[in-house]
Amino acid sequence: MTNCIMQINLLLPLPQEFLKQGEATSTRCDELESLRKRGCDGAKVENPRGSQQVLKNKAVTNRNKGAKKLRPEDITQIQPQKLTLSLRSGEPQSFNLKFKRAEDYPIDLYYLMDLSYSMKDDLENVKNLGTQLMLEMSKITSDFRIGFGSFVEKTVMPYISTTPAKLLNPCTGDQNCTSPFSYKNVLKLTSNGQEFNTLVGQQQISGNLDSPEGGFDAIMQVAVCGEHIGWRNVTRLLVFSTDAGFHFAGDGKLGGIVLPNDGKCHLENNMYTMSHYYDYPSIAHLVQKLSDNNIQTIFAITEEFQPVYKELKNLIPKSAVGTLSANSSNVINLIIDAYNSLSSEVILENSKLAEGVTITYQSRCKNGVTGEGEMGRKCSNISIGDEVSFTISITAKQCPKMGKPETIKIKPLGFTEEVEIALNFICECDCHKNGIEDSEICHNGNGTFECGACRCNEGRIGRHCECSTNEVTSEDLDKNCRKDNGTDICSNNGDCVCGTCECKKRENPEERYSGKFCECDNFNCDRSNNKLCGGHGRCECRVCICDANWTGSACDCSLDTTTCLASNKQICNGRGTCECGTCKCTDPKFQGPTCEICPTCPGVCAEHKECVQCRAFGTGEKKETCERDCSYFNLIKVKDRDKLPQPGQAFPLMHCKERDANDCWFYYTYAVNNNTEKEVHVVETLDCPAGPDIIPIVAGVVAGIVLIGLALLLIWKLLMIIHDRREFAKFEKEKMNAKWDTVRVDSRQYQAAIFEKFNGDDVFLPV
């Protein structure tokens, strides 16, 4: 969205006071912020805005079924009905559209039936359809009309037999059938259900040769012959009943018909007279005509052809498919169900948009359901009396050719009401209306001074119309537009106009050439981080003019040292220098953004042990808070210790060996890479001591006990042997030393003793 310097009075600065040398007058139209940056006073900016005006805003109708009957044109279901939008390029204009499904809204229903021979039994049930359908539809609306039409096929070979007898009676045997025809409007829309029964009762079955029927010809005539059918500007329903497929565009070539369907009405005496002349319509052609005439189609089809017509339904908006019983006995229920389905959904469509104009929809449907994009065009499950709304935004991305007003229309599919929107385009500033013709500012009246610049009269050129196209030769002009003889005219970046360079405009309005010879620009300066002048300066004549606290050819070097302050408030922790806002550590042990990280200092392993343990193995004291407390490093697992990084790489690292609560060892390295990212490489398996082998231990204990017992027995035995030997030796010694003394016992004592012992027996003792 561009803005232009406007002229308030003649005291405003002339263009040269705002434009740099060499810049074209058109450079004065630019983005608002860009103009401000270049020093343009906000009071001198012409900045027209878009607007909208509602011209017709009749409220939607609130009406009950028993209320006073209204004419269809007096019932309003959509609001507003007409408005005007003034669109400025790139600025959307939005408005709200309200839709309310009116109660007791009039309905026109036209029953279009296939009268080929296979529909004979169906015709009998349809003969009483009028009064029965009137009775059922009276529950929905008090203003209902019904009509009837029939179709068979094009009246040429090979669709029908053209022998005279078959043209009179196409049926075989004793069957009495009517002559074949393409389409017949039997009954114009009427509110007389008995008349429907009477006329339909007079119809006869006809016949044709091929299975597909010519129903598309009939649908086209029903859609475009509004006066013959009697359509009103109310809900229009077309019930299409058949038990066969359909011919479409291109099939007419079989009968030598090559002219495409013209989409016009060709009914004479209620008969379609051009079936032999025009081909069948295409599906797209039918869709267009049905939509243009707000007709909603209900396909009442037998089970066999349901798949075909369901695919057709997907191509025709606001259409429905119902399964017709073999004899059409369920046709009334089918119509009621299909009508309820169609009327419960509203889909907005718009007419063709002008070039460069876009439109978006946002729906606010029943029960708070919202939609955007294509879903923003529709609301479903709408009951009678429900109100839904849509926010519609229209944007002009560019001014259309000639800038002429355009008109678009928005309407709900299947409804006759619409919103008419007139689009006016703001393609120039209002200050053009206040131009001063033959102004003295434009070189003595050689142009019109408008919007702060001169618009030269025919034959005059130059910023102030100071030159005549006939006064100077091109060589004279070129000489003044070269910096020297070896350079291009206006440095090949502009045009030489009246001996003065007018620099070319760039596609990007932020980029521009300037200078007396267009030798300067504001987009070819050095870049940093893919930004011109690092985003911290402006480019003037290919040189960066840096903002405060920035320096360097690309303004990428910050003079601010706050980013270098360590936690102890020292610059780079006292172990480095601050260069362009980044610390360059002078102590090789320290690294990081403020030279505070020392991967190889003592205590590093213990500091990170718990976090490495929880992230690598899911154990340790920080197991529960691991995600919160331990996400400050990148964890890389390796298979074994040989895969751990080794000393000697570009950045220092620390090898760590720690033990967990289960006496298992784990090995890892801690380092800070060149991108100041903390990296931990850890061996993915724990090194745990092997558990005891029970069997050898038990066997060892038992064997030890036995051996100890045996040893004790042997010691005891040895001691006993030693003791016995000592006693025996002592005994032997005493034996050897014993002396036997012969004692002479007193004979009398001896005898007395003997005598006493033997109780006085005589004993003879030796003397």
Image: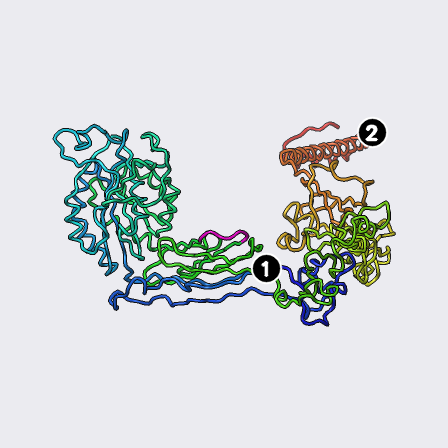
| Amino acid type shown at disc 2 | Met
User: CB atoms at circles 2 and 1 under 8 Å apart?
Assistant: no
**Residue 327 visible (yes or no):** yes
Residue with the most extreme left position? 174
Nearer to me, 435 or 59: 435
Is label 2 or label 1 in front?
1
Question: Which quadrant, please, contains the N terminus?
Answer: bottom right
In magenta stretch: residue 352: yes
Quarter the C terminus occupies? top right
Q: Amino acid at mark 1?
A: Cys
Q: Looking at the image, which is closer to me, 551 or 539?
A: 539
Above or below 660: residue 365: below
Residue, disc 1: 427
Q: Considering only order in the chain, which callout, 1 or 2, is on the residue closer to the N terminus? A: 1
Q: Which residue was labeled with disc 2?
A: 736
Q: Position of residue 332 (x, y in %)?
A: 22, 49
Does residue 174 appear left or right of residue 455 in this picture?
Answer: left
Furthest toward the front, the residue is 470
**What secondary structure prevails in the magenta region?**
loop
Total tally of numbered discs in the picture: 2
Q: CA distance from mark 2 to mark 1?
A: 155 Å
Among the 4 quarters of the image, the one containing residue 112: top left
Q: Magenta segment range?
A: 351-356
Tag 1 secondary structure: loop
Please say whether residue 581 is one of the residues in the magenta stretch.
no
- Could you say where residue 226 lies in the image, as x and y percent from the top left? 30, 51
